[in-house]
Image (cartoon, helix red, strand yellow):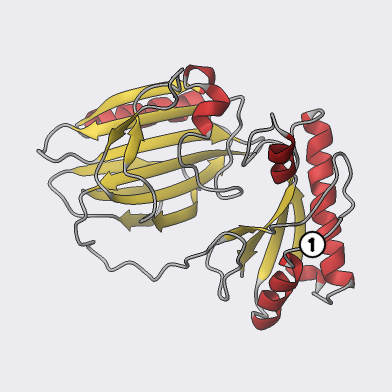
Amino acid sequence: MKIRLLFPLIVMFGLPAQAEFVLQLPLGAKETYSQTEPNLAPLVATKPFGENGQEFTPAPAHIRRSVWSFGGEQSLAEVQESILAQLESSDYEVLFFCQTEQCGGFDFRFAIDVVSEPAMRVDLRDFRFISARQTVIQEPSYVTFLLSKSPESVYVQMTEYTANLAPAVAPQPETTVLEGQIPAKPDRVSMVLEGLQFEPGIATLGADPEKSLQRLVDVMTKNKALKVLLVGHSDMTGTLRANVALSIQRAATIRDILIQKYGIAADRLSAHGVGFLSPRASNDTAEGRKKNRRVEAVFSE
């Protein structure tokens, strides 16, 4: 399948095949992530999360995930209807469509594969999911869409499942990042600064047993042009407003330490926070809440 994503003056080419699917997104849409995913399971959600967990349909094994963000003038319903109409006109049948609680809410969100924050942001109170399959060839491709919205932007994650055909254009080398590591040459990578310890409700940094800050400093020292967005996260205790403020404070704490203790230039660091809107573990357990109290480093140049 050849997929061309049409933006004003921007055309991106995917894999060649017997049919063509064209996804159109609004003016100003910005790609925040695009990677082939050899380690993802070739499984597509086609039902809500139920008593027996999440049910999936097998799909082709060549997987690529892409994410775009654009201004929040459009509602999720409008974006959803546009994608559904484009699928219908491109000989795709919709296998499954759901909204938030219809999908299974929190359980569904964490049963499917989602690109990490901040490239993809998911509001657990309002997201949409679509899965579809080609109808015109013997070995059809599949595609899924996850839609959500922050106060400023709409986010669209598209996951393509195609036969493992040679791409029309050889892909660029991709950075492989193992959990807890920071790549020597980051390339659109966000990394959790693992091991940083924050107590509930405060921004004071405790121990750093895995020396995540020192590894980050080493990378920034070697890459003088590198800038880092520090994104704070919280658990789900308290209100959204309070947790967003707390997560910003935690990111600012790390920024201050990097500047004052390690001598990183202030203009290379910025602090942001999203509160509890992007958990990576359940908030029902103390261990899960501890994992959610974190800061991520997002690399840019």
Can you give x and y, in whole percent of width and height, for residue 211 in the image?
74, 68
Q: Is residue 214 above or below residue 21?
A: below
Three-letter code, disc 1: Asp
Residue toward you, 207 or 249:
207
Q: How many marks?
A: 1
> Residue 92 is drawn in which quadrant?
top left
150 with respect to 165 (left or right): right
Q: Is residue 188 above or below residue 67?
A: below
Q: Give me the residue at 24% from left, 47% from top.
A: 162
**Quick check: can you spot residue 127?**
no
11 with respect to 152 (left or right): left
Q: Is residue 254 above or below residue 132?
A: below
233 with respect to 45 (left or right): right
Q: Give me the residue at 34% from left, 35% from top.
A: 44
Q: Residues within 10 Å of mark 1 (few under 14, many from 20)?
A: some
Can you give x and y, in whole percent of width and height, for residue 128 in the image?
48, 27
Task: Identify the secondary structure beneath mark 1.
Answer: loop
Q: Give me the residue at 79% from left, 62% from top.
A: 208
Q: Give me the residue at 53% from left, 35% from top.
A: 110
Rendered-image quadrant of the C terminus: bottom right
Residue toward you, 77 or 98:
98
91 with respect to 178 (left or right): left
Can you give x and y, in whole percent of width and height, for residue 292 in the image?
70, 42
The residue labelled by disc 1 is: 208
Q: Residue furthest left?
A: 138
